[in-house]
Every structure is written in C-alpha cells, then in structure tokens.
Image (cartoon, helix red, strand yellow):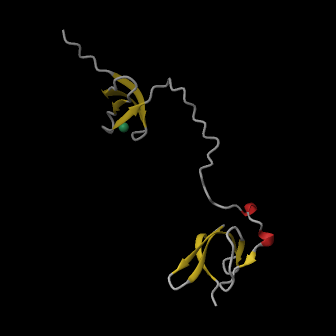
Amino acid sequence: MPSTKTNTIEQYCSVCKDQFDMEVVKQGSSKGVIWLKCPGCQGYLPYMPEENEETEDSAGGDAANPELALEDLDIENAREYSESDTYEVGEIVHHRSWNDYGKVLSKDELPGNRKTVWVQFLRQGKIQLLEGVE
Ligand SMILES: [Zn+2]
C-alpha cells in the first residue's frame, strides 16, 4: 500500500499573513534550505529550522560610512570658502551660501589647469569646488 503521506510543515506566510500547513517541495541534502509551498498564495518560501544558534547581534551597525558629523569638524578653524583661495587636504571649510561645513578630501584638476578640491560637506555631501581662481 503506497504511502501518500505528504510532508508538511506549519509556517507563517508573510504574504498571506496567515499560518498554513505547507507542503515540503524540496528538501536539501544535508544543511540545505527546505522549501515550502504556501497553499494560499502558491508561493515558495524557505523553511528555517529553529535550531539556529546564530544570534542576530546587530547592535553595532556601524557600516563603513564616510559621512561626517559636526563634532568631527573643527569648525572654529574653518575657513570661509572662496574660489580664489586654495585649500589643503584635511582643511575645514565653511560654505557661506549653503551655511555648510565640510572637510577637504582631495585635490583635483580640471582641463584647462583649473584647480579644484573635493569637499565632503555635512549636508550637501561630496562636492567638487573650484579653487585658486584668479
Ligand atoms: Zn502565502
């Protein structure tokens, strides 16, 4: 007598927002993901065994983000940006029109010997400004 027992696992479907006895459609060999088919939306979703020891410790969450914070900038020594001045890498500048502080990241040159500096501003982001304009 053939065994018609279907292998099902009860799981919550976030699409249907309901709990179902889902049919196991594909079972990985050893540590593979078990795929379940939702009878509600007919969608496939992975079944995650609960014996997962990995704790979701995402307390740090500090991605490599070059964003500046105001306290990182020595704004007391910031120089007013003027395109006729020249700036050094690491220097803090204040852009009067934007009322924004930034730090000179690097220097660059445009065609025609026009000198520029790349400045990471607090609010405006990374912006290329002219310098040494006569
Ligand atoms: Zn569903």
Q: Nearer the viewer, residue 64 or 112?
A: 112
Q: Nearer the viewer, residue 100 or 107?
A: 107
User: The C terminus lies in which quarter of the figure?
Assistant: bottom right
Taking the spot 38% from the left edge, 28% from the top edge, the residue there is 32
- The residue most toward the top is 1
Ligand 1 visible in quadrant: top left
Q: Position of residue 38 (x, y in %)?
A: 34, 34
Taking the spot 34% from the left edge, 30% from the top edge, the residue there is 36
Quarter of the image for residue 26 reads top left
Q: Position of residue 107 (x, y in %)?
A: 61, 73
Q: Nearer the viewer, residue 85 or 34?
A: 85
In the rendered view, would you say 101 is above or below 27?
Answer: below
Quarter of the image for residue 30 reads top left
Horizontal placement of 21 versus 50: left or right?
A: left
In the rendered view, would you say 44 is above or below 100?
Answer: above
Q: Nearer the viewer, residue 30 or 105?
A: 105
Q: Position of residue 44 (x, y in %)?
A: 33, 36
Quarter of the image for residue 6 reads top left
- The residue most toward the bottom is 134
Horizontal placement of 91 versus 22: left or right?
A: right
- The residue most toward the front is 113
- The residue most toward the left is 1
In the rendered view, would you say 61 is above or below 82?
Answer: above
